[in-house]
């Protein structure tokens, strides 16, 4: 696809759910790319369709996504594992949890934290990670990432009092 | 060596790898997080106070400004205390982590020593001495066999040998001189290729 994704945003049919399945699948794929890029740029970790209000509407062509379209789109993103349901909202993963996990683990290795214990809160808001890309993400979003790291046995999560902590291996 | 390799971790793969020490450290760090958050909150409140004082002065509300200044002072005092607490906590965490490392080193040393003991148990001084004796005996026996064999090989008497050598020397004097003319050339029968193959290949095969 040579056409930049942004060009579709000025194209009225792009806002109408296409009946042809192939076309629809392509349309949903493109919309997903747009939302992921938007989320990454604006650091949107957990969102409802409200958070995408600006991008899901184009006043110049007087178009906006219908509620039905939004539901189909979020379902598609869930299926593609670009989103995870979080109550009424969605966690948006422009990078897969496994890829984030690698990044967190690399930080742990580089800073000599393998074998030691960190709080999840400390990972996302502590003084030691201010220069990391994952700095500032919500605690429950970080939990999804750490759980994926747990699957590869590079980390183990555990609860202490009211907080969650993680040990790297 | 079963004594060391026996108690591995393979029996409890699914078990947690987090121990009591880890939990204690985590608890300290969670408290540290809380103090950090509290410090952030205080800093934020102080900033608000400062801007409130500024607007009060601009609006010439002296009483209000004074009140806000008082608030700012006690917030700053609290902030100072909280920062001290954070420093103490950081130090304590560092000390505990250090102690944990030392404990790990101690455990490793202990395990190493046990392993060494275990090996030593399997190997007593008596056993080694006995083994060395046996080795010496075996070597002696081997030497005896060697001597026996070499004696068999030497069948000649030294005097007889000297006599034979004398006879050879006498014969040597009568040997005719080597002819001066070159020897007739023998036609080469081995083709070039085969010869090369022999040089590079098996040494044992000689093709004529």
Image (cartoon, rainbow, N blue to C red):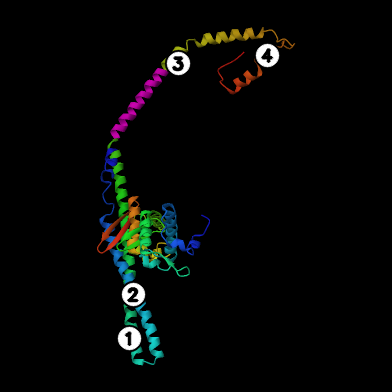
Specify start and end residues of the magenta stretch as a single range: B125-146
Marked residue chain, label 4: B
Q: Which mark is residue B70?
A: 1
| Circle 2 residue | B41
The spot of residue B142 in percent (x, y) is 39, 21
Secondary structure beneath dot 4 equals: loop
Q: Are marks 4 and 3 on the same chain?
A: yes
Q: Are marks 2 and 4 on the same chain?
A: yes
| Circle 4 residue | B188
The spot of residue A45 in percent (x, y) is 38, 63
| Circle 3 residue | B150
Q: Are marks 2 and 4 in contact (CB under 8 Å)?
A: no
Secondary structure beneath dot 2 equals: helix
Q: Of B101 and A3, which appears nearest the observer? A: A3
For the residues marked 2 and 4, what is the alpha-carbon distance in whole angstroms?
Answer: 105 Å
Query: In the picture, residue B42 is in which quadrant?
Result: bottom left
Location of the N terminus of chain B by quadrant is top left
Marked residue chain, label 2: B
Marked residue chain, label 1: B
For the residues marked 4 and 3, what is the alpha-carbon distance in whole angstroms?
Answer: 45 Å
Residue at the location (29% across, 32% down)?
B127
For the residues marked 2 and 3, what is the alpha-carbon distance in whole angstroms?
Answer: 99 Å
Mark 2 vs mark 4: in front: 2
Marked residue chain, label 3: B
For the residues marked 4 and 1, what is the alpha-carbon distance in whole angstroms?
Answer: 120 Å
Query: In the picture, residue B141 is in which quadrant?
Result: top left
The spot of residue B167 in percent (x, y) is 59, 7
């Amino acid at each position: 696809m040579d056409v930049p994704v942004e060009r579709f945003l000025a194209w009225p049919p792009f806002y109408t759910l296409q009946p042809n399945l192939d076309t629809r699948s392509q349309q949903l794929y493109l919309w997903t790319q747009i939302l992921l890029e938007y989320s990454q740029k604006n650091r949107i970790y957990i969102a409802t369709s409200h958070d995408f209000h600006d991008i899901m509407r184009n006043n110049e062509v007087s178009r906006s996504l219908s509620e039905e379209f939004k539901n189909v789109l979020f379902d598609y993103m869930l299926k593609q594992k670009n989103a995870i349901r979080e109550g009424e909202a969605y966690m948006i993963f422009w990078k897969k949890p496994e890829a984030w996990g690698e990044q967190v683990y690399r930080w742990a290795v580089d800073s000599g934290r393998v074998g030691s214990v960190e709080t999840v809160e400390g990972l996302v808001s502590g003084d030691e990670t201010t220069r990391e890309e994952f700095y500032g993400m919500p605690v429950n979003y970080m939990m999804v990432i750490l759980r994926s790291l747990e699957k590869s046995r590079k980390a183990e999560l555990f609860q202490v009092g009211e907080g969650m902590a993680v040990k790297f291996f | 060596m079963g004594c060391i390799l026996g108690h591995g971790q393979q029996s409890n793969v699914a078990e947690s790898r987090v121990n009591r020490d880890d939990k204690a450290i985590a608890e300290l760090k969670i408290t540290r997080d809380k103090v950090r958050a509290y410090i952030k909150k205080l800093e934020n409140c102080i900033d608000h106070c400062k801007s409130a004082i500024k607007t009060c002065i601009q609006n010439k509300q002296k009483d209000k400004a004074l009140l806000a200044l008082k608030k700012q002072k006690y917030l700053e005092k609290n902030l100072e205390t909280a920062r001290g607490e954070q420093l103490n906590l950081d130090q304590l965490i560092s000390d505990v982590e250090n102690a944990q490392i030392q404990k790990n080193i101690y455990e490793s040393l202990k395990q190493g020593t046990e392993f060494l003991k275990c090996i030593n148990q399997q190997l007593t001084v008596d056993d080694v001495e006995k083994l060395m004796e046996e080795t010496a005996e075996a070597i002696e026996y081997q030497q005896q066999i060697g001597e026996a064999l070499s004696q068999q090989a030497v069948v000649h008497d030294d005097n007889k040998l000297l006599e034979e050598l004398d006879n050879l020397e006498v014969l040597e004097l009568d040997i005719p001189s080597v002819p001066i003319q070159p020897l007739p050339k023998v036609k080469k029968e081995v083709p070039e290729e085969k010869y090369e193959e022999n040089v590079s290949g098996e040494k044992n095969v000689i093709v004529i």
